[in-house]
Image (cartoon, rainbow, N blue to C red):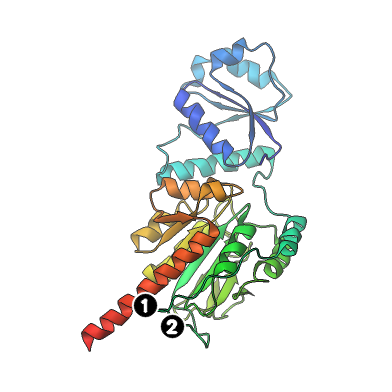
Amino acid sequence: MSSGQNVIIIADDVLQRHRLQQALDKYGVSIVFIGDPARFAGEKTIPDADLCLVELTDEEEYPDLIETLLNRDDWTVLFGPGAAPVPGRQEYIRWERRLFVKLEDQLGSLEALEDKDTLEALADAGTGSESLALPQWITPVLQPRPVEQIWILGASLGGPAAVKEFLDALPPGLPVGFVYAQHIDTRFSEVLGRVLTRDAHYSLVPAEENRTLYTGEVLQVPVDRDIWLDEQARVQFRDDPWPGPYGPSIDQVMLNLSRTYRDHCHAIIFSGMGNDGALGAPAMKQAGSHIWIQTPDSCASGAMPESVQATGSAGFEGTPRELAAQLLRTLEEQFLLGNKSKCNSA
């Protein structure tokens, strides 16, 4: 999906050109020219562009190029954030974020988000399949209780459809709660809440100060306020807005909850543009958490799952329904191990 912005990339290093192209692809930016300074100078016709992104090893080696670019008034010239580190590392993810902020400063918002019509169409479509059966070894929760195991659901573009399919596939009575961090326009949060759990056994609840998250609930993370959950699963707000370019910040949600719940908190990253979640995933994995991703090929935008995948943190990938089935298998294993421990201690 294109952001509608056309960009020229000029870089004298082939590896840097490749990494700049990969980074811009994550936001659907249309690259109308990519090449080194010599190729650019030899072009008879330069495509129309909104911005020219320049990354040079030594700008002093190309005075004529710099003068030519700066003398043009039909595009903005942006000098890049420096050489890209090795992909998958935290330094690379932060490099991508710096580039993203620079681009948005010049071009405006790049991340495509669901609009009201898309969400309403999702509501009209309904569910296409029945929920999965509850495994026999899982004791269903009949009376909701404060959650002890949390699954973070992180998503951006294409997320509502994917998360809806995931939740629709789950049977009732699971001993978990969900925290749903979705990049979305604040104006459509209410529509999202109405659509998401219409056909599911799990209810979407708003984030309210000191509200307890119970099993069987999906907590909708606010777009504009940083939250965390205390040891009693009560929602707490921070005074500051979400750090970084995203709202809500999936990375920050992961870090906030992982500090309190450690290996009782897990995350699934669904469809989305950008790389949100790629900083939080390694930290959660180190704490003993499960990190899963939606298969990129099944996403409206595979950039977010691919970014997490590149960190080496993802332990499982699948379609939304396959992710639901994997959750049931994981919970069943937990019940079996718990029962075995009880028998051994008896």
As drawn, the label of residue 301 is: none
Report whether 131 appears left or right of 108: left
Please rate how many residues cluster around mark 2, counting C-alpha atoms within 10 Å: few if below 14, some from 14 to 19, many from 20.
Answer: few
As drawn, the label of residue 139 is: 2
- Residue 261 in percent (x, y) is at 41, 71
Mark 1 falls on what kind of element? helix
Question: Mark 1 vs mark 2: which is more N-terminal?
Answer: 2
Mark 2 falls on what kind of element? loop
> In percent of the image, x 48 and y 68: which residue is there?
151
Report whether 337 appears left or right of 327: left
Which residue matches tag 1? 335
Depth check: give the residue in front, 149 or 79: 149
Q: Residue furthest right?
A: 117
> In percent of the image, x 54 and y 75: which residue is there?
235
- Identify the image quadrant of the C terminus: bottom left
Pointers 1 and 2 in contact (C-beta within 8 Å): yes
